[in-house]
Image: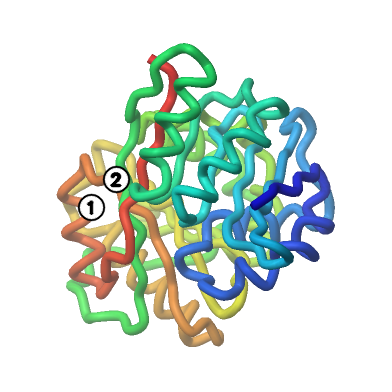
């Protein structure tokens, strides 16, 4: 086995796109991130895209954009060993590693050995798939698309969401907000004229639309706003041609997992994020 690396998302897509699209739900995190960067990468990200090959066949993929960990698709332990040996010299400064449990645990062990310091689990997530929306109760208020007038609030809530789930905010929290508004990928639930919940989506790739982030301010939680808005948005995506929706939940938050199950989201795989102790 061997690895090929590049900082060019278009070159990476040409190399690994067929592999990524072979399972557009399980590979969705990397697929949507690469797809969104076809027009260029953000300043300061220093991207690294990795394809693991067995002969001429891609058998695994990964990406790292600073300040986030190196994230991988599912792959065999032999592929993990190859990735660590060949990628460590150029990505040893990554903040950690992330990926499906069966892949990331041996990856974290080998990565820790290379670094000479311990990596610990800082987040446990679950990837879900939805093919059909189940009916859910509707709280007071209604949904609408975000507009340019909502830009500052969307940036503020983007930072709040990352802090809420224990993740580092993006280098530029405002990056991509304007594009999401223009593309109709940002939504609010309003009650009494006030913003009470927000859902964003990503551009569909291979018929799969990733939903997230989903954010409700602390004082507005427990009233069904996020459930109703996520259900509405998921149905819109299916109605507009997506064959499925995907969504990540924080396993430390049983309430959110229960909410998405009620809408019709079904668990696909568990993901862990490791960072340095």
Determine the residue positioned at 41% across, 48% down: 103
Q: Quadrant of residue 5?
A: top right
Residue 147 at x, y = what percent? 61, 57
Determine the residue positioned at 46% across, 40% down: 98
Residue 101 at x, y = what percent? 34, 47
Q: Nearer the viewer, mark 1 or mark 2?
A: 2
Residue 165 at x, y = what percent? 35, 35
Q: Quadrant of residue 7?
A: top right
Determine the residue positioned at 76% across, 39% down: 42
Q: The C terminus is located in which quarter?
A: top left
Determine the residue positioned at 27% across, 37% down: 218
Q: Is residue 208 left or right of residue 91?
A: left
Dot 1: element: helix
State the residue position of label 2: 250
Please tell me which of labels 1 and 2 falls first in the chain: 2
Q: Is residue 217 left or right of residue 81?
A: left
Which disc is residue 256 wearing?
1
Evaluate if marks 1 and 2 touch, with contact meaning CB atoms under 8 Å apart.
yes
Q: Is residue 120 above or below residue 117?
A: below
Residue 88 at x, y = what percent? 63, 29
What whole-number distance in Å separates the C-alpha atoms at marks 1 and 2? 8 Å
Q: Residues within 10 Å of mark 1 (few under 14, many from 20)?
A: some
Q: Residues within 10 Å of mark 2 (few under 14, many from 20)?
A: some
Q: Is residue 158 above or below residue 271?
A: above
- Render colour scheme: rainbow
- Which residue is at the front of the view, 268 or 80? 80
Dot 2: element: strand
């Amino acid at each position: 086995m061997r690895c090929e690396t590049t900082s060019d998302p278009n070159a990476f897509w040409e190399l690994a796109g067929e592999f990524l699209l072979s399972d557009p739900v399980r590979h969705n995190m990397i697929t949507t991130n690469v797809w969104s960067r076809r027009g260029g990468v953000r300043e300061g990200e220093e991207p690294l895209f990795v394809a693991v090959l067995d002969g001429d066949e891609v058998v695994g993929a990964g990406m790292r954009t600073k300040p986030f960990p190196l994230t991988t698709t599912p792959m065999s332990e032999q592929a993990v060993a190859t990735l660590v040996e060949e990628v460590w010299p150029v990505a040893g400064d990554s903040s950690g590693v992330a990926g499906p449990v069966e892949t990331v645990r041996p990856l974290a062990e080998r990565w820790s050995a290379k670094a000479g310091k311990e990596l610990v689990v800082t987040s446990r997530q679950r990837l879900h798939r939805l093919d059909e929306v189940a009916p859910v109760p509707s709280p007071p208020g209604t949904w609408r698309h975000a507009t340019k007038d909502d830009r500052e609030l969307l940036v503020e809530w983007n930072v709040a969401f990352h802090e809420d789930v224990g993740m580092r905010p993006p280098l530029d929290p405002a990056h991509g907000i304007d594009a999401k508004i223009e593309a109709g990928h940002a939504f609010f639930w309003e009650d009494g004229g006030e913003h009470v919940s927000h859902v964003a989506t990503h551009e569909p790739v291979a018929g799969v639309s990733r939903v997230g982030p989903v954010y409700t301010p602390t004082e507005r939680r427990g009233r069904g706003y996020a459930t109703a808005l996520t259900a509405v948005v998921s149905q819109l995506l299916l109605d507009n041609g997506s064959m499925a929706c995907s969504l990540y939940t924080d396993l430390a938050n049983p309430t959110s997992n229960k909410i998405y199950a009620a809408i019709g989201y079904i668990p696909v795989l568990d993901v862990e994020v490791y960072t340095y102790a």
